[in-house]
């Protein structure tokens, strides 16, 4: 462990209190216990459902659970273990699903009052189907802002989700329900999605790991209207668990025309902290300009490069050079995507849509065809610039967010318009280039707020992102920390 890592764990977090051990077991440990008959999928699912009942009112991370549904899945997994025929290394492992992904047998609200919760869902989205085929037990659906449109997790349907590390702060968004659930021990796995940072921002804000895979790595259907900006990806407390999840989620899906024909290759050396041979660039601003800066965040993020160097990587300080401000095309794609979402809703229900979504949609209606085509051209120029940069480097390390989590009552920090993304420019460029990018926990501020470092890789080289994240995690094992509120709320 690198100098200072242990101090960060113990001074800024608390190891899980007695009685939390089962809730914070990783997927591999749970599968081993199932196989050896030391634990059963049913008793684990029952324990976690009880935990959700007790702790979810603190944060509002879970928006739907069905005990009978979950225990039926767990019972089937238990029978397979008795027969010594588990479906996969994740058979019987509990997971939550962000409520933007369809789960047959569960409602799909997408945080919107325009959707009827009584409408039956009969078909899984591809990532959910792959997890179901692997025997994963679905614990619950997690909160999202309406159609994932915010950097916080607040919707007209379910209200606001709080950060488990400080209930007065946001957990980020739009996968804030998923990240808060992980932080509180509501299962080791969570499905998230990321169209502009929606996996990485909440992962950074709640001390968990999240990976935005390369575009096309995880099949999706039906395609999002803002593709290729948005992808589905794994979130977990450990890198290993996220890698196991990605291995399942990325399996073939015939409905997605963008899905890669080459399967994800689970890194055989993920537990090997040796990064020799990797050239890693480090940039404190990732070639972007944010009006917000925070010295604590900068100091913590800088530790990631130290850990990577300690593991043998060759480190270079260099910024990507963008041909234009990435916000320019992103603003076009976001506003027109919101417009399409609003226009797709029944006309008599559009007044029920989140006011921010309607406001941004109105701006999207003013975008001309020529402006949209120019944005596509600009996105291509950004991708060319990224390719040029990553021809010289294997990976890039920098910040996820410019500041720690802010007040729960706000959609954006003080001083910014709700529709203005320019204050947090470090995540959405990599959606437009399609590259894999992850947030790995890197420390806590003096106020105990989590901070993540972002690791970006070449298109298609998700395994290298996971390798570097695992090497950092090995030296800085912040997954051993848990929210201090658990000291009082679980005793």
Image: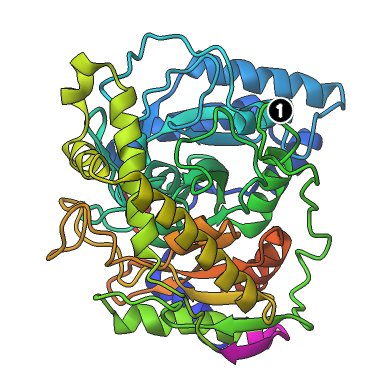
SS at circle 1: loop
Residue 250 position, x and y percent, is 70, 41
Q: Is residue 370 left or right of residue 386?
A: left
Res. 112 image quadrant = top left
Residue 199 position, x and y percent, is 47, 51
Q: How is the image coloured?
A: rainbow
Q: Which part of the image, by quadrant, shows the N terminus?
A: bottom right
Residue at point 38%, 82% (across, down): 298
Res. 175 image quadrant = top left
Residue at point 28%, 79% (across, down): 293
Residue at point 49%, 35% (across, down): 224
Which residue is at the far left? 415
Question: Along the line of sight, which residue is nearer the eye, 467 or 69?
Answer: 467
Q: Is residue 120 magenta?
A: no
Q: Is residue 61 visible?
A: no
Which residue is at the far right? 84
Question: Along the line of sight, which residue is nearer the eye, 127 or 7?
Answer: 127
Q: Is residue 316 magenta?
A: yes
Residue 171 position, x and y percent, is 33, 53
Q: Is residue 176 left or right of residue 194?
A: left
Which residue is at the far front? 370
Count of marks overlaid on the render = 1
Residue 92 position, x and y percent, is 68, 31
In the picture of the structure, the residue carrying the numbered disc 1 is 135
Question: Along the line of sight, which residue is nearer the eye, 282 or 304?
Answer: 282
Please state the extent of the stretch shown in magenta in the rendering.
309-317
State whether residue 318 is above or below residue 180: below
Question: Along the line of sight, which residue is nearer the eye, 473 or 99?
Answer: 99
Residue at point 40%, 9% (across, down): 119
State whether residue 329 is above or below residue 311: above
Q: Is residue 484 visible?
A: yes
Res. 437 image quadrant = bottom right
């Amino acid at each position: 462990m690198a100098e200072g890592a242990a101090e960060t764990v113990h001074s800024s977090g608390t190891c899980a209190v007695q009685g939390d051990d089962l809730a914070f077991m990783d997927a591999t440990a749970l599968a081993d216990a199932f196989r050896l008959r030391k634990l059963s999928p049913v008793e684990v699912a029952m324990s976690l459902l009880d935990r959700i009942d007790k702790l979810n009112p603190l944060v509002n991370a879970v928006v739907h659970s069905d005990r009978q549904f979950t225990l039926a899945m767990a019972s089937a997994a238990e029978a397979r273990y008795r027969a010594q025929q588990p479906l996969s290394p994740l058979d019987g492992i509990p997971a939550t699903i962000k409520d933007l992904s369809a789960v047959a047998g569960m409602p799909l609200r997408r945080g919107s009052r325009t959707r009827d919760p009584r409408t039956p869902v009969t078909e899984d989205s591809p990532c959910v189907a792959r997890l179901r085929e692997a025997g994963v037990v679905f614990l619950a659906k997690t909160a999202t802002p309406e159609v994932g449109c915010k950097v916080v997790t607040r919707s007209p349907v379910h209200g606001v989700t709080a950060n488990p590390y400080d209930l007065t702060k946001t957990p980020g968004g739009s996968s804030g329900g998923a990240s808060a659930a992980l932080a509180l021990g509501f299962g080791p796995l969570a499905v998230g999605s990321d169209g502009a940072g929606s996996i990485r921002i909440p992962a950074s804000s709640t001390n968990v790991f999240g990976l935005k895979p390369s575009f096309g790595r995880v099949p999706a259907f039906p395609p999002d209207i803002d593709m290729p900006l948005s992808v589905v990806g794994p979130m977990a407390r450990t890198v290993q668990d996220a890698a196991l999840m990605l291995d399942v989620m990325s399996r073939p899906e015939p409905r997605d025309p963008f899905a890669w024909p080459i399967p994800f290759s689970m890194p055989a050396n993920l537990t090997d902290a040796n990064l020799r041979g990797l050239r890693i660039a480090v940039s404190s601003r990732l070639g972007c300009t944010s009006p917000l800066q925070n010295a604590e965040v900068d100091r913590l993020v800088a530790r990631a490069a130290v850990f990577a160097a300690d593991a043998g990587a060759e480190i270079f300080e260099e910024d990507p050079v963008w041909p234009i401000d990435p916000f320019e095309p992103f603003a076009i794609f976001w506003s027109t995507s919101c417009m399409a979402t609003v226009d797709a809703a029944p006309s008599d229900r559009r007044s029920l849509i989140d006011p921010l979504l309607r406001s941004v949609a109105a701006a999207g209606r003013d975008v001309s065809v020529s402006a949209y085509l120019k944005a596509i051209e600009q996105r291509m120029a950004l991708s060319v610039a990224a390719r040029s940069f990553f021809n010289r480097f294997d990976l890039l390390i920098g910040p996820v967010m410019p500041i720690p989590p802010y007040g729960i009552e706000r959609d954006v920090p003080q001083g910014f318009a709700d529709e203005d993304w320019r204050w947090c420019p470090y995540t959405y460029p990599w959606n437009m280039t399609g590259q894999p990018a992850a947030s790995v926990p890197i420390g806590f501020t003096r106020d105990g707020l989590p901070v993540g470092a972002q690791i970006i890789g070449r298109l298609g080289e998700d395994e290298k992102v996971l390798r570097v994240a695992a090497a950092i995690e090995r030296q800085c094992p912040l997954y051993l920390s848990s929210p201090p509120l658990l000291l009082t709320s679980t005793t």
